[in-house]
Image: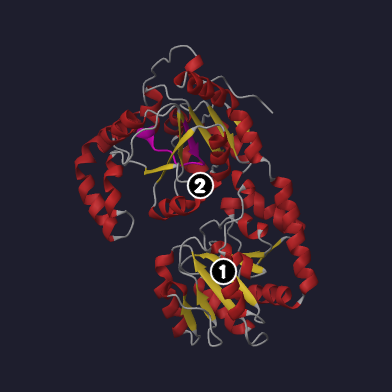
Amino acid sequence: MTSASPPRWQAGPLLAEPLPMTLRVYQKLTAGVAPLASLLIKRRLKQGKEEASRVNERRGVAAHVRPHGPLVWIHGASVGEVLAAAGLIERLRDLNLRILLTSGTVTSAEIVAKRFPPDIIHQFIPYDAPSFVARFLDHWQPSLALFIESDLWPNLILASAARRLPMVLINGRMSPRSFPRWQRASATIGTLLGKFDICLAQSQMDAERFSALGSPNVITTGNLKMDVAPPPGDPARLERLMAVTRGRPVIVAASTHPGEEEILLDVHRTLSGVFPTLLTVIVPRHPHRGEQIAQLVESAGLGASLRSREQLPTAATAIYVADTMGELGLFYRLAPIVFMGGSLIEHGGQNPIEAVKLGASIVHGPHVANFSEVYHALDDAGGAFTAGDVETLVRRFGQLLSDGPARQASIDAATEVVDRLGGALDRTVSALEPYLLQLQIEQDAAHA
């Protein structure tokens, strides 16, 4: 593997280059609208997209004291990116490095609170106005910044680079939809990517796209999501679910989006003619949609129970709406067959790795561009199956429900693929080694 460039603090002075017009205009516009942040916050609070007690973090106001010594700042947009960093965070904690983790969604903050160690400092990323960004950086003064995937905020990147903060893009992903858009703004994206010391890309295709857009130093390290540990599942809650569903065939539809539930209800209605006790568990990507989904179920003439109401499936429950946060691990353990949502519509699909690691046979729709490499490998090996309409979904589910050995063969094949594609965490840590060694030197000096 190509070794990483030396940390920026070991290099000579940075020469200021003129910014493209797009970025200069962006800086002026975002500076001008900063006074309107209160209006934006008010609207987002009504939409449930902000946490009332923490809105000042969006203005760059810190809720915690900066810890002494080197501080590694990791930023990810939402739940998927934050969870992808879990293994890396554990490695950094093993080196006794303190972590500041930022994200942009309420759900990601809830996941951090539930699943990460209490010494991980979580803050909402500030809105990308120059004054808010400056306040954030003035307080935290991070020693190293790791941006996950592709959540690139111009003011945040430019201000960090101006302070000579070493920045690395980790688990870098450039989707087929985003790539041509950025090509049309090549000067803008080239300037932003040029501020990163290294880009650690998920795949060779991602690496080629980042290089074409202006990343000066790209290394293919693989997808960190392949190395993520399976989500937890409370044993007592799992036993209770298993007790009330024992003897029933169960299918889980995970991380579903609007437009998919209607299709899944049609599938359930057809399958129940062959499997009369079938239980379909729908886990919406956004739990607040639970009541809406329950109304869809009832309008379809099917019995529904909602987990957010602390209901358990009964004999009359055809569709169990699991509209709670952080419980996918329970349902992956409950069902041997999982449909991965976001794939029947043009969303790009959801990550199947956790379901595979918990022993599920995977069915998905045709729209899986977000994880195309993974799904392609799973499909080729017989570890996952594509189904794009009601008829095909019924056939796939029916085969997996009725043929235990074939189902187990697909589970085994999927497990082998995920094991083979792993190792991104080790490669990422190796690429970051020059930076981590420097931080350990600083840490030792701070404690001397």
User: In the shown orientation, is residue 313 left or right of residue 138?
Assistant: right
Residue pointed to by mark 2: 81
Instruction: Say what amino acid the circle numbered 1 marks.
Output: Ala
Residue in view at x 41 percent, y 21 percent: 164
Q: Secondary structure at mark 1?
A: helix
Residue in view at x 40 percent, y 74 percent: 291
Residue 172 visible somewhere in the drawing: no
Q: Is residue 64 above or below residue 354?
A: above
User: In the shown orientation, is residue 338 left or right of residue 44?
Assistant: right
Residue 261: image location, x then y, percent: 50, 72
Estimate how packed mark 2 is, as few (under 14), some (14 to 19) or many (20 or more) residues with alpha carbons within 10 Å.
many
Residue 397: image location, x then y, percent: 67, 74
Instruction: Say what amino acid the circle numbered 2 marks.
Output: Glu
Q: Is residue 313 above or below residue 94?
A: below
Q: Is residue 367 above or below residue 438?
A: below
**Looking at the rendered structure, which numbered label has been put on residue 412?**
none
Towards the viewer: 220 or 353 = 353
In this rendering, the count of numbered labels is: 2
In which quadrant will I find the N terminus? top right
Pointers 2 and 1 in contact (C-beta within 8 Å): no
User: In the shown orientation, is residue 123 left or right of residue 386?
Assistant: left
Residue pointed to by mark 1: 236
| Residue farthest to the top, as pictured | 12
User: In this figure, which colouring scheme has been used for the structure?
Assistant: secondary structure
Query: Which region shows up in magenta?
Result: 145-156
Q: Is residue 435 above or below residue 391?
A: above
Residue in view at x 52 percent, y 20 percent: 441
Towards the viewer: 171 or 229 = 229
Of the residues under marks 2 and 1, which one precedes in the sequence? 2
